């Protein structure tokens, strides 16, 4: 019984702890937060639609289950991409690099 509780705890940490899940490879903390926020909205909407479709049989039930399956795959793709290309997320842009200088003497 203790092993099952530990497994649930580790599974929870894998999905919701930014120090453990694959989003830890993203250097920008704000980007990590935004991705977790979007994933939480995705899962909330998916479970809401699924719960609403549980009263239906057939097509409605299939649609609800497909939405849960799609949310699972979207989450897996985000985690996989963050693990592989996390260093590309939230790159700091040099604000002086694309700076436009307005020279009034030449343009006026």
Image: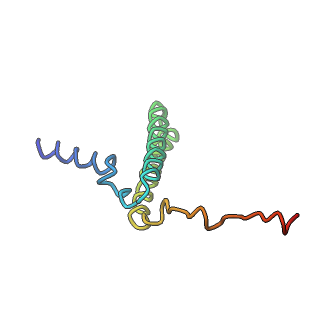
> Which residue is at a point 17% across and 42% down the rendered structure image?
5
Extreme residue in the right direction: 108
Considering depth in this image, is 8 or 107 the residue closer to the camera?
A: 107
**Is residue 104 toward the left or the right of residue 72 in the image?**
right
> Which residue is at a point 52% across and 41% down the rendered structure image?
59
Extreme residue in the left direction: 2
> Which residue is at a point 44% across and 56% down the rendered structure image?
28
Q: Position of residue 35 (x, y in %)?
A: 46, 50
Considering depth in this image, is 53 or 11 the residue closer to the camera?
A: 11
Q: Position of residue 7 (x, y in %)?
A: 19, 48
The mark tally for this picture is 0
Q: Position of residue 75 (x, y in %)?
A: 42, 53
Q: Position of residue 26 (x, y in %)?
A: 41, 59
Considering depth in this image, is 1 or 84 the residue closer to the camera?
A: 84
Protein image colouring: rainbow
Q: Is residue 94 above or below residue 38?
A: below
* Quadrant in which the C terminus appears: bottom right
**Is residue 104 toward the left or the right of residue 58 in the image?**
right
Q: Is residue 60 above or below residue 26?
A: above
> Which residue is at a point 46% across and 54% down the rendered structure image?
74
Q: Is residue 18 above or below residue 103?
A: above
* Quadrant in which the N terminus appears: top left
Q: Is residue 61 above or below residue 76?
A: above
**Is residue 36 toward the left or the right of residue 3 in the image?**
right
């Amino acid at each position: 019984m203790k092993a099952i509780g530990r497994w649930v705890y580790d599974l929870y940490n894998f999905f919701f702890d930014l120090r453990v899940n694959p989003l830890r490879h993203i250097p920008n903390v704000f980007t990590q937060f935004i991705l977790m926020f979007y994933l939480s909205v995705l899962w909330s909407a998916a479970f809401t639609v699924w719960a609403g479709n549980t009263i239906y049989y057939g097509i409605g039930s299939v649609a609800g289950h497909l939405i849960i399956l799609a949310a699972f795959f979207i989450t897996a793709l985000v985690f996989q991409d963050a693990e592989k290309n996390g260093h590309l997320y939230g790159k700091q842009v040099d604000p002086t690099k694309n700076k436009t200088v307005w020279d009034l003497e030449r343009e006026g």
